[in-house]
Amino acid sequence: MRQAVIVSYARTGLAKAARGGFNDTSNMTMLGHAIEHAVKRSKVDPAEVEDVVAGCVAASGNVARAAALLAGLPVTTAGSTVNRACSSGLNAIANAARYITEDGADIVVGCGVDSITFQGGGGGGKEPRLTEMYPDFWMPMIDTADVVAARYKISREYQDEYSLESQRRMAAAQQAGKFKDEIIPVKTKMKKVNKETKEETIVDYTVDRDECNRPDTTLEGLSKLAPVKGPDKFITAGNASQLSDGAAAVVLMEAKEAERRGLQPLGAFKSWAIAGCEPDEMGIGPVFAVPRLLARHNLKVDDIDLWELNEAFASQCLYCRDTLGIDPEKYNVNGGSIAIGHPFGMTGARLTGHALLEGKRRGVKNAVVSMCIGGGMGAAGLFEIY
């Protein structure tokens, strides 16, 4: 029986959308850097990579193919791009693994990227018939997070306390150098705007760390932030993931091929599951996807040693954590997207790579990566850590 293992991982730092170090850098350029360095770390010949599968939400065209060529992979390496909203990076890894286990490929890159700078955070037309069938299908995700908070009585204070903990954990992990093995520095050109004159200049810049977190965050400061959608709502700039740019990639290989080459994989992709839910509470999707995934492997929540559940909003990730009964000490242990940032198509790939590295540090076996998905879905992936 064929098995897909992950032999390497690399990512860029995360930069603030529009104002950060990638505000003049394209999706394909960021992703090309991540792929290039993931392949170098794997020690495989680039010509041996059969396909590149990329998750991306905020772009048109086949960014996977373009990024593969920019990464220095030959024209014989193919590429395809997946868009399943915020699970796109995880979906790409699942597709890459399936290509290995079911179709006979030996080496495939799974990856994800998004530049929210160039996309603007939304877009697309609306089909009237779908609107009639599901009026909430087009509901902005921030509104769905407010719905979850109100419907399931997740207080503003609880959300802010969680958000502070995300910032604290991320700052501690950054201070301890826990992200250094992941991040490859990227030299860029950054656009700077003079606040007074509005004059634009382009400067040389290097993104070599995550730039979105706020280590000086306090509970008092969070409590003073006004809800985005009005005083009777919950979601603020402090208890939601901020828009950001970045890319991440992993190299997957058939297990026996990795063994033949004398490689030590980070872990194995076991499987993933998808589930749907009501569009107006899309944030709770993991509470349906996770049980489906665990049941297929005769596992319980307590059997999982490490959880990475994307922090799109504090309301949704708190509801999912508490409803599923996940131990907070196993959950987003180094902070999450509220602190780090959330380039939609990248996050699933970042969570996967980070879970494997952190799991290895901790000497644990099972990790689950999960997230909510715009439109009303949840995804969850199971990984065995070596």
Image: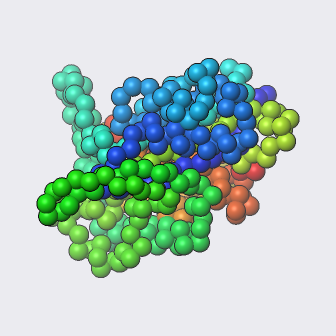
Residue 108 appears at what percent x and percent y? Answer: 64, 31
Q: Is residue 325 left or right of residue 375?
A: right
Position of 328 relative to 41 (above/below): below
Q: Write the residue at 18% across / 24% down.
A: 128
Task: Please name whichever residue, 362 or 290, is drawn nearer the observer in this view of the structure.
Answer: 362
Q: Is residue 324 visible?
A: no
Position of 115 relative to 339 (above/below): above
Q: Is residue 226 left or right of residue 216?
A: left
Position of 72 relative to 306 (above/below): above
Q: Write the residue at 50% across / 26% down.
A: 65
Q: Is residue 223 visible?
A: yes
Q: Write the residue at 65% across / 24% down.
A: 50
Q: How is the image coloured?
A: rainbow
Task: Please name whichever residue, 351 or 19, is drawn nearer the observer in this view of the structure.
Answer: 19
Q: Is residue 103 left or right of residue 71?
A: right
Residue 208 appears at what percent x and percent y? Answer: 50, 58
Position of 231 relative to 266 (above/below): below
Q: Write the residue at 41% across / 65% down.
A: 213
Number of numbered discs overlaid on the protein picture: 0
Res 75 → quadrant = top right
Task: Please name whichever residue, 101 or 144, is drawn nearer the observer in this view of the structure.
Answer: 101
Res 228 → quadrant = bottom left
Task: Please name whichever residue, 230 or 179, is drawn nearer the observer in this view of the structure.
Answer: 179
Residue 187 appears at what percent x and percent y? Answer: 47, 51
Task: Point out the image quarter for the N terminus.
Answer: top right
Residue 68 appears at what percent x and percent y? Answer: 55, 31
